[in-house]
Image (cartoon, rainbow, N blue to C red):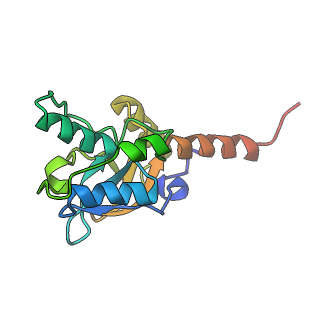
C-alpha cells in the first residue's frame, strides 16, 4: 500500500455539474441520480468548486434570514451516505424561477489531489481537514474521487495480499 497512489484507488465515475446550471436543475440532477453532491466545473471542464444538497438547503435558509455557515460544504463531510433516501428527495423542492445558479451557492473551497498523490498524504489531508472525499484532478480537470470507503478498501486489500504468518 505504501506505493499506491490516488490513481490506484480512485473512482473514475464522477458526476460533475456546470457552474451555470440553475439551482432548480441541480436539484433535479441530484434527485435523478440519487446523489447528494458533485464537483462543479466551468465551461472548459476545470474544477471550480463543490456543491451539495446542504448548499441548496443553506441557500433556502439564507433567503429566510437564517445564518449560513459556508466555510466548508457538507460535500466533504458526509462520506457514508452518498445516496438520498425517499424522504430527502421529496423535501428537495426548489422554485424554478429563483434565478440562482450553482455558482451562487457552491463552495469554492476544494480539497483536491493529483493522480500521483500517495495514500499516506491523502490520509493526512482527510484527517487534517476532517473530510471524507478528495477530488482527483489532472490539469484542473476532474478525473476521479477518493472517499474514505476507497481508503478502507485499500487497507483491506493490503491485508489480504500480505502473507499470513503463524
> Is 104 rendered above or below residue 19?
above
- 21 relative position to 28: left or right: left
- Which residue is at a point 22% across and 44% down the rendered structure image? 109
Judged from this view, the residue extending furthest toward the bottom is 44
Q: Position of residue 157 (x, y in %)?
A: 68, 46
Quadrant containing the C terminus in the rendered view: top right
Q: Position of residue 79 (x, y in %)?
A: 46, 39
- Which residue is at a point 46% across and 45% down the rendered structure image? 84
Query: In front: 64, or 80?
Result: 64
Q: Examine the image and state in which quarter residue 88 appears.
A: top left
Query: In front: 97, or 149?
Result: 97
Q: Position of residue 32 (x, y in %)?
A: 42, 60
- 57 relative position to 75: left or right: left
Query: In front: 33, or 142?
Result: 33
The answer to whether residue 133 is seen in the rendering is no
The answer to whether residue 53 is seen in the rendering is yes
Query: In front: 36, or 42?
Result: 36
- Which residue is at a point 22% across and 55% down the rendered structure image? 23
Judged from this view, the residue extending furthest toward the top is 67
- 52 relative position to 89: left or right: left
Q: Examine the image and state in which quarter residue 67 appears.
A: top left
How many numbered dots are placed on residues in this image? Answer: 0
Q: Position of residue 142 (x, y in %)?
A: 35, 62
Amino acid at each position: 500500500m505504501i506505493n499506491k497512489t490516488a490513481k490506484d484507488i480512485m473512482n473514475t465515475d464522477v458526476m460533475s455539474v456546470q457552474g451555470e446550471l440553475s439551482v432548480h436543475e441541480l436539484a433535479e440532477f441530484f434527485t435523478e441520480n440519487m446523489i447528494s453532491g458533485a464537483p462543479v466545473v466551468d465551461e472548459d471542464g476545470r474544477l471550480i468548486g463543490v456543491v451539495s444538497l446542504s448548499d441548496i438547503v443553506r441557500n433556502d435558509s439564507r433567503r429566510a434570514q437564517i445564518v449560513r455557515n459556508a466555510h466548508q460544504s457538507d460535500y466533504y463531510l458526509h462520506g457514508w451516505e452518498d445516496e438520498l433516501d425517499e424522504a430527502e428527495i421529496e423535501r428537495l423542492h426548489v422554485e424554478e424561477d429563483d434565478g440562482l445558479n450553482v455558482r451562487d451557492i457552491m463552495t469554492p473551497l476544494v480539497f483536491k489531489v493529483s493522480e500521483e498523490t500517495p495514500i499516506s498524504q491523502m490520509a493526512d489531508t482527510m484527517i487534517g481537514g476532517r473530510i471524507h472525499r478528495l477530488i482527483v484532478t489532472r490539469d484542473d480537470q476532474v478525473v476521479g474521487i477518493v472517499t474514505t470507503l476507497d481508503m478502507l478498501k485499500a487497507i483491506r486489500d493490503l491485508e489480504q495480499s500480505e502473507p499470513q504468518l503463524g
